[in-house]
Image (cartoon, grey):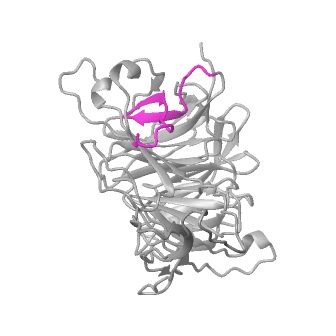
Amino acid sequence: STASSTAASTTAAASTAEPSTTTTTTTTTTTTTTTSDTSNLPKSGTVELLVENITYSGHSLHWSPTQSCLYLADIWGLKHVRFAVVPPPTTTPAPSTTESTTSASSPASVSSVSSSPDEPETTPAFRTGESSSASSSSADSSSTLPVLTTPSTTTTSAPPSPYDIREFRIPSSYLFRLMDTPYDLSYPFVLPVNDLDNVYKGDVAMAIGSTVVITSFDTTDAENLNQTVNKDKFLTLKRGGKDILPFHVMSSAWVDPLGRMITGSYDIRPLLNKLPKSTMCMWDRVLECYTDSVDTLEVCHPSGVSFSPDNSTMYISDSSLKTLSLYSYDIGIGRSGELIKSISMGSLLTADSDTATPAGLATDENGHIWMGVAGGQSGKVIEVNPESEEVISEIEMPEADIVDIAFGGDSLDLLYVLTKTSLYQISEIGIVGVKVPDFELVIYD
């Protein structure tokens, strides 16, 4: 399928190109595995480019099962993005007639005119293992419209966008009330919020620098695509924060099966060797960081967190150490345990193992881990059996700079992939992801 749309142009200081939506279909190949367990059979999928230039420097991705939308953080583009698919309009078919009678007392006669819009532009298909892409075809569409036989004027309008894309920014000066020269801060993550006690007055948690504020996107005004909040309103927002090390920025954010938020930090300097000094936090349904709950995690640059279907194991990927680590996890109190094992990218991948970097994690219904892999000639998404440490499937992506992945859709049967600037969707994989809840908040005294 081919889709096109135009997202609203940005107005912030860090402006990006106007997002354009296109679709490209990808046939993927997978690794060969011989097994009697059907869950260990290689899988393939259809890769579609949903939106180009949706971010300047994409950083995190999260699907909200309650709001049925995606939230994206643009860390250096200095904005948060809400992405939702617009439901197709419901139409009532015109009544059909089998005969028409013309008389002097009848209104002007009506004839049927076939109107064929221009054939939409097709984008080349990306196929694994091919040096060039084949073109996908799109059939002409036509509609029959009743028009008066009297002279009329035909007007052509652009089709409505299939997506609702909204951006949100908070002026950095709001966070530096005592400084004459405030500076820009990073936008590391945005998460949907489930306000259980209805006291936080917002449905998203936005990180600006190391501060987390609770606010909301306006989804009622179709024209309000570039949003902000005035200073008086900002001062009333609930917020929390955690001091992090110099030269560090906050990582993406993740949610455990009971709605607790987990965050980290990482050093942005291009050091040759980095120590595992990430400031890991557990936000246990309140806007306060608890480091003791995750003090067993030895992480340098956390790039993905997910959990086993039975909630007993935490999976965490590290972009600097290039590892996938498994820790025991106590879901009852929200506390990480001992390291079970650590799997290197070199042991998982033979090709591009030197440049392959883990970027995003998600768990499926079979207990397998889906991991975004950046670097190399092209990016990919791989399926890993954490018990056997075997790569079950590999799905090639058109872009190498993958930053995060998430299962989504009403049935959790879609896998969304965020690169530095683009948003993709992988469908027809044949598996369902484990539900990740929104960040849950309660009254805290």
Can residue 143 be seen at all in this image of the molecule? no
Callout count: 0
Q: Quadrant of the C terminus?
A: top right
147 displayed left or right of 329: left
Q: Residue at x 45, y 22 (%)?
A: 237
At a point 59% along the width and 66% down the height, the residue shown is 104
- The magenta stretch is 198-225
**In the foreground, 38 or 3:** 3
Q: Is residue 220 magenta?
A: yes
Q: Quadrant of residue 27?
A: bottom right
- As drawn, 420 above or below 214: below
Instruction: Say if 134 sits above or below 407 in the image.
Output: below
> What residue is rendered at 55% in x and 27% in y?
290
Say above or below: 95 vs 270: below
Which x, y percent locates residue 254? Answer: 56, 43
Give the side of residue 157 with respect to residue 93, left or right: left
**Residue 335 inside the magenta-drawn segment:** no
Where residue 359 appears, x then y in whole percent? 48, 57
Q: Residue at x 27, y 42 (%)?
A: 12
Q: Residue furthest right?
A: 36
Q: Nearer the viewer, residue 287 or 96?
A: 96
| Residue 283 screen position, x and y as percent | 56, 30
